Amino acid sequence: MNPKLESALAATRRHFLSGCSLGLANLFLAEARGAKKPDHPAKAKSVIFLHMAGAPSQLELFDYKPELVKYDGKPCPDELLKGKRFAFIKGVPRMLGTPYKFKQHGQSGAWLSELLPNLSTVVDDLTIIRSMSTDQFNHAPAQLFLHTGNPRFGFASMGAWATYGLGSENEDLPGFVVLTSGGNNPDGGKSLWGSAFLPSVHQGVHCRSHGDPVLFLSDPEGMTRSLRRKTIDALKDLNALQAKQAGDPETDARMGQYELAYRMQISVPQVMDISKEPPAVHAAYGTEPGKTSLANNCLLARRLVENGVRFVQIFDWGWDHHGTSKRDDIQHALRPHIRSTDQAVTALLKDLKQRGLLDETLVVWGGEFGRTPMRENRGGTEGAFFGRDHHPYAYTMWMAGGGIKKGLNFGETDDIGYYVAKDKMTPRDLQATILHQLGLNPHTLHYPYLGLNQRLIGPSDEARVMKELLA
Amino acid sequence: MLRWLPLTLLALTLRAEAPDFQRDVRPLLSKKCIACHGPDEHSRQAGLRLDQPHAKGARILARVSHPTRPMPPSGPRLTPAEIKTLEDWVAAGAPYTAHWAYQKPKPTPAPGHAIDFFILQKLAEKNLTPSKPADRPTLARRLALDLLGVPPDPALAAEFLRTGDYSKYVDALLANPQFGERWAKIWLDLARYADTQGYEKDSKRTIWPYRDWVIRAFNDNLPFNEFTIRQLAGDLLPDPSIDDLIATGFHRNTMTNTEGGTDDEEYRDLAIRDRLATTGQVWMGQTWGCAQCHTHKYDPLTHKEFYQLYAFFNQTADDDHPSDRPTLKLTDKSSTLILKELPPGKQRKTRIYERGNFLTPGETVEAALPAAFPPLPAKAPRNRLGFAQWLVSPENPLTARVTVNRFWSRLMGRGLVDSEEDFGTQGVPPTHPELLDHLALEFQKDWNVKKLLKTIVTSATYKQASDLTPELREKDPQNKYYARAGRFRLDAEMVRDQALAAAGLLSRKLYGPPVMPWQPEGVWLVVYNGDSWVTSPGEDRYRRALYTFMRRTSAYPSMMNFDAPTGEVCTIKRIRTNTPLQALTVMNDPTFMEAAQHLAARARQESPADPLAKLFALALLRPPTPAERQRIAALHAATTADLARQPQNAAKLLNYDKVLYSEDRQATLLPDARTTPREWRYRLTDPGDANWMKPSYDASQWSAGPGYFGHFSKPSETTPIKTTWDTDVLWLRYELDLPAAVPTNFKLPARTNAQFDVWINGVLAVSNIFERSGHYEYPINDDGQKAFRPGRNTIAIRVARNGIRGAGQVFDAGLIGSLPLQLGKPQPGDAAKAAWVVVANTILNLDETVTRR
């Protein structure tokens, strides 16, 4: 049996013996919602994970490669192609230097591209990791690997692990909230925020910007608040009669859930309503109430962590810049997308900092893999537009706040950005580091399932808490 | 009714002096030692192996009680009591026996109803007394929910309540076709059934004929051994029937990755592993998947043996192709996925994949069974058929045990082996090993599923009351020893189906393609996929939940909220949770509100003098108690008073379904090229005015023409081009008149392979960059919805190919919307009637209603 359940049961017995009415189910509730003691003092109370689904190009944004610019248009050397699998590149592609200018910024001297004018002003708050490396080169498996620790379906997501390990700080809001933008859900689908073998109470709650923010949150047509209150009061009394006869603690727990649901009907729309934020905030983020956008979701993320939500997972779709048309190339398509992202994400960091929340909020930004230093030649020929194929070997992510070093440039790639040259870091290392900052031990946080102690970081002990990144 | 056997017949087993290896020692070794001293040679430390007989007992004792460096080196140490157990065991000569589950089941004589005999024996041992029998209404409801997954027919229930003829009631339920639907759903969890391919696009696939085959198999009581062989190897049977082929869909439920740039062999390999792992879990309760990268750390399965098992499954023709080939053609329109063995000369070599990576193949292996199990009979074919036959042979100690345990668990709320998914050394040992073996041996005789279920439900153990007394709460809160019946929340499908059945809405239609009952807007947002959720017409809205279309990447919300799996992987056991989202679902999900509306109407019609009695009879099969009557009367009175002041709300509650299904009021406001296309104003060159999309702009000089717009390198019959558009960008305008009562829920059906933006009266309403198939009904955003007005409206569209090359380009669009709802004039008495809807909503939310007790 699962040790958590075992201890919950033991506690239930103690409660019954001492005449307390808190039942087993209430303890499940407590497991999911109440704050729990971490393994070690936490550096971060909350996480905001900004996933740019599709994989933004590190070579256009963070990884400055003047050598690659020199080789622009030259055929890719054979040794970089031999034995390699690519999603779309065929034959011998040509090298592609970035058309964008890079400059050093801040005390840390971080090289950033001209596409990041806002982020470059807060660069001394970031740890930029230019040495990420994964082993998946297709979207859905790579996203699953990043968020669930396994490229296959059927594993619990990072946010689910966090609330399983820590519970939530706010009794009236879910502990793990998912926000999406870009017109599509991410390629990996809802499994990216699923609970898999963990109890489903830990799965991320997808909050939407159209219709009900949480499905079935609003009362049905004709049912007023006052009528709803009356039904819940009646349910309470009727269930109490049932509880008296059947003696099942689940009945009490269910009643607790109805009260919580009733409170959520008020608290969720309140926290999701950004219309009352001052104009200066909207101007800073680039938010427009009523729209579905990354900017709106960044502002929502701040409001959610402010209200004690443990894990906010943002997915922004549309970063797969292959260069097959104007809508997915690195000149026409990347530029507007990164412009609004740069503004919103920087506003989020500044806003958190100004409110004193950045120290306890870990912000993570990045895609599921990187993009090739070669120009994509789909079907073996080059088109009219410029783009890059999927590249698992080296890419960039950044982290900020939550006990992460400020102004750190971590890791390096080789001269053309093909391989990691120094301080390689994997999605598993990232997962271990995030759990560690939350006060959890990634090596011992487990759930027994199918004869194995399942962990976010997988069965092997390769994952490492990246101490070099910690303040 | 069966009575409990006299307890005096029972003898208590005395605990032997020496510890029992299976019961006391093996669990200790498994927990503390085997990870480093077990079957896996890579992780094995000091060359010491403790999962097999050996002569180093003294060495173990020395190490676990070592003063400075005790074993285990990390984690909690052995307690003094545990060390004492090991000492006693070593003193007795350290006897080893194989893990209990790898030994063949042993018969134990059992007088009377064997289940009750074994259960009572254990209860006496634990100093527990059984509960009193449940009353008839409780049994009537419990049995119907357990066997059918829905409440019983009122007439059948009434007969049982009158006569108390339990056996007849059981037989009637087992003969009802709804039985097959309920038990098929349980099996489909294991089969990881879904209606899409999984991964990214997650396109539709047709495999529902397999789902129907499972329903029929349960209804026809197909013996479980045949059921097994046909699903795993129906294609290899001599002269397989069409049904035998459809049955092989079991293992075609693995996912297909059609994402651009994926390696088909990589995902074919994953599918084969999934088939092996699933087979191990479903039939053997074994966690074989653990051995794909290295030898199993706990159970006797080496890395090599994993690939020997893999070889059985590695010869099928399917290859992760987007078409999901091979398929079996059923009608002109539909084909279903099946297994097909490669012909002899074309069979694959199976190699051991180092660390489970298909890019690093090692030694070649042949199909064979692991050494820990009896071998395949010499004459058996060394393929899937031989393997499937072996699974259900009397030599295999596991299939029957695992299967009876699963059926037992569904009826009792907990397995005799609690770890239903793991009968290996890390699993939980059975609470009643003799009973498990007895049921397994009986089941093996004829593999008769309905007989097994009837045996269980006719036991006094099953028929007990489920109430949790203070004594039981303290002594056996988890009901390990079955001194009461199980009391647990209904499965997701049952919560919904029960509400529809009570309301009289539930369709009795069996089988067929998946259906789309009401679902909130915007749930389906799948990458690169043109599929949309279109609410099914007529009774298909009210089919049982197992017929609801299952998209793997986007589950049906109420099912997901109630812990239903979504078909990515085999789910052996659902975890039941209790969450606020469940409360929100039953309170507010329009499906449940619609059920409340009809439940209330039905109760008022069938029992005008006492609707409450009928509400209780339909939902709970029992009359309300006086206290319940009083409380609900108060709710009804207070609600009536509220609604009397709000006639519009009373009207909405009484007409809830009409309000909900706005699609039933849908009308074509602007026909598209599929019917009678209208003439649009269009341009192929830039209008050169930033206000070109605004109503004030004058487009009278633009050209005029109907859809389809575009050009093809070869003319298309299905898509006749009426107006040539062969440039990159197309500008379109249409002036549309709307009535004073402006429709709602506008959508734009459009067919194109280009990207486009739409403005309604100058307001950006659609911005689409994805290519969808057919005339996809593009949703119009909130701003766009609000921009429509009575009288003249301007629809402006900019279509752009953005430089994409291809065999042609096409654009066509229309407009649809829902006409406003006309509710009748308020009538006196509406408030009291509508208050019954609110009461019915409350009854559906009762703890008792969502609970099987």
Image (tube, coloured by chain):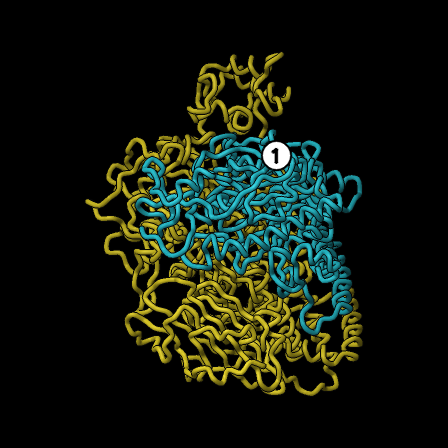
Chain colours: A cyan, B yellow
- Helix, strand or loop at disc 1? strand
Q: Is residue A12 above or below residue B552?
A: above
* B80 or B545: nearer the viewer: B545
**From where the camera sits, is residue A376 visible?**
yes
Residue lying at the far left in this picture: please name it.
B345
Give the percent coordinates (x, y) of residue B310. Answer: 34, 40
**From where the camera sits, is residue B446 visible?**
no
Q: Is residue B64 left or right of residue A25?
A: left
Image point 60% across, 79% down: which residue?
A: B788
Which image quarter holds the N terminus of chain A?
top right
Which residue bears the numbered disc 1? A408
Density class for disc 1 (Cα within 10 Å; few <14, some 14-19, many ≥20) is: many
Give the percent coordinates (x, y) of residue B739. Answer: 59, 87
* A384 or B21: nearer the viewer: A384
Q: Is residue B381 left or right of residue A286?
A: left
Which image quarter holds the C terminus of chain A?
top right
Q: Is residue B51 above or below residue B547?
A: above
* B335 or B806: nearer the viewer: B806
Q: Is residue B519 left or right of residue B708?
A: right
Counting the numbered discs, the total is 1
Image point 74% across, 83% down: which residue?
A: B829
* B450 or A455: nearer the viewer: A455
Question: Residue B141: which quarter of the image?
Answer: bottom right
